[in-house]
Amino acid sequence: PVAPALLVPAPGEPQLTVPPLEQAAPRPSPPAQASPRNSGDAAAGPIETVAGAVVEAMGAAEDVADAKIDELAILAKEAIDGAADAAGHAVDSAVPVAKQEVHDVEEALEDAVQDAA
């Protein structure tokens, strides 16, 4: 039997052919391996080994991220507390100045009223 052509070759090139399916050589089966999930004593396969390493790396990354989040939370709390203290001191020092200014304005108004009378 003549095999079907895959491509039309350029002049002077050999023609490529594909054997019919019944003539194709069977592919050998891969060797059987014990599945680690099915046999408790078998060593973990490469996929399981990589998956385990990925899980461990993710756990370590999560621990690092948690520590950094805690560190940032502490720094943010310290910054907020510092800003609150600074605002409190600013108010504490501004109140007497404002009271003095109000008192000065009151005296100036009293003087103006007396001068007008």
Image (cartoon, helix red, strand yellow):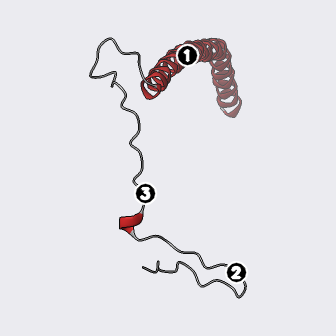
Residue 41 or residue 58, whichever sits in front:
41
- Residue 110: x %, y % from top left: 64, 25
The quarter of the picture where the N terminus appears is: bottom left
Q: Write down the quadrant of residue 10 in the picture.
A: bottom right
Question: Disc 3 marks which residue?
Answer: 25
Identify the image quadrant of the C terminus: top right
Q: Nearer the viewer, residue 112 or 95?
A: 95
Mark 2 and mark 1: span between their CA atoms?
A: 63 Å
Q: CA distance from mark 3 to mark 2?
A: 26 Å
Write the residue at 65% across / 28% down.
Answer: 109
Residue 48: where, in percent of width, then height? 42, 24
Mark 2 residue crowding within 10 angstroms, few (<14) / some (14–19) / many (20+): few
Q: Amino acid at mark 2?
A: Glu
* Residue under label 2: 13
- Please report whichever mark, 3 or 1, sits nearer to the chain's N-terminal start: 3
Label pair 2/1, CB-CB below 8 angstroms: no
Q: Nearer the viewer, residue 115 or 39?
A: 39
Q: Which residue is mark 1?
A: 64
Indicate the position of residue 6 as horizontal and vertical percent values.
Answer: 53, 78
Which residue is situated farthest in the left direction here? Answer: 38
The answer to whether the residues at label 3 and label 1 have Cβ atoms under 8 Å apart is no
Looking at the rendered structure, the secondary structure element under dot 3 is loop
Mark 3 closeness class: few <14, some 14–19, many ≥20 residues within 10 Å? few
Q: Amino acid at mark 3?
A: Ala
